[in-house]
Each structure stands twice: as C-alpha cells, then as structure tokens.
Image (cartoon, rainbow, N blue to C red):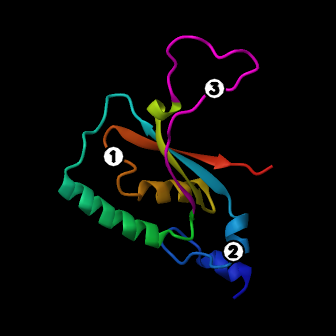
Amino acid sequence: MSKTESLERHSVYGERPTNSLERETMPKYLCLQRALPGGDGGKPSPAQMQAMYAKFNEWRERFQQNLTDMGGRLGGGRIVTTEPAPDGPLMEVKELVGGYMIVSADTLDEAVQIARGCPGLVRPGSGVEVIEIFAP
C-alpha cells in the first residue's frame, strides 16, 4: 500500500497507520487535563470506576496508534528562574493540570476527537486542552 493510500484510509474512526515512520511524521498534540472553574465533579463510585476502566481499555485499543505518550498525573516540582524563586504561596501546576498525554493526529480536530473520546478525561469539573506541538 502506498503512503497516499494509507493516509486516505486514516481517520478517527478508521484504520491507523502501521508504519512507524508515518506515525513519527504525524503532528503531535499535548492534551492537558485541567480543572474547570466550578469545582470538582465528584469522585466516581467503585462500580463507575470499573465501567470507566473497561471503556478506557476499549478506547486505548482503538487509538493505540495515536497514543504517543499516555502521560500521567503530575507530581511536585520547582520553578527555575534566573532570580531566586519568589516567596509566598504559589499555585502549583498539579493544582491546575491533573495530567497529560501526547497524541498523534492529522489535524487538531482529530486530536480533539481522540481526547474527547477518552473515558474519564472529559467529565464534570474538568476538561482537556489540546495544543499542537511544533517540532524544532
């Protein structure tokens, strides 16, 4: 199959490229899970978590060729500046961003659809910011 034929078949709901070079040249997008104003959406029950994980595994299988880096939750960190770090309470990134992942997609719209379909990522009290990553 030619690269053109493969790309023609590539869509959010269709087959994914199997050629690693093709995946490497696709644009990449950073997906940041963010807390939204208005609070948290509540903690899911164990039954809801089990159902969400089952849906998540289906989603991960479906988009495995697009999932460049599944990322994870963020931990503690430090601010690096040319000046000493400011004193006082600072908002930590982990308070704003719950986690991240990097996806490969042909377009921003496709990356948004992939992120939107991830069970548990977009829910009441949180959303996902999808940002294109430009390679140097």
Is 37 situated above or below 16? above
Nearest to viewer (mark 2 / mark 1): 2
Rate crowding at label 2 as few (under 14), some (14 to 19) or many (20 or more) other CA atoms within 10 Å: few
* Residue lying at 52% horizontally and 19% vertically, measured from the top left: 90
- Per the rendering, the mark at residue 79 is 3
| Element at label 3 | loop
Instruction: Magenta stretch: give its range.
Output: 68-92
Front one among 60 and 122: 60
Marks 2 and 3 sit apart, C-alpha to C-alpha, by: 36 Å
- Per the rendering, the mark at residue 123 is 1
Marks 3 and 1 sit apart, C-alpha to C-alpha, by: 30 Å
Nearest to viewer (mark 2 / mark 3): 3
* Residue lying at 65% horizontally and 80% vertically, measured from the top left: 6
Rate crowding at label 3 as few (under 14), some (14 to 19) or many (20 or more) other CA atoms within 10 Å: few
Is 56 situated above or below 132? below
| Element at label 1 | loop
Q: What's the residue type where badge 3 is placed?
A: Ile
Nearest to viewer (mark 3 / mark 1): 3
Residue 85: in magenta span: yes
Marks 2 and 1 sit apart, C-alpha to C-alpha, by: 32 Å
Q: What's the residue type where badge 1 is placed?
A: Arg
| Element at label 2 | helix
Residue 37: x percent and y percent? 37, 28
Is tag 2's residue or tag 3's residue first in the polypeptide sequence? 2
Q: What's the residue type where badge 2 is placed?
A: Ser
Q: Hey, which residue is sitting farthest right in the picture?
A: 136
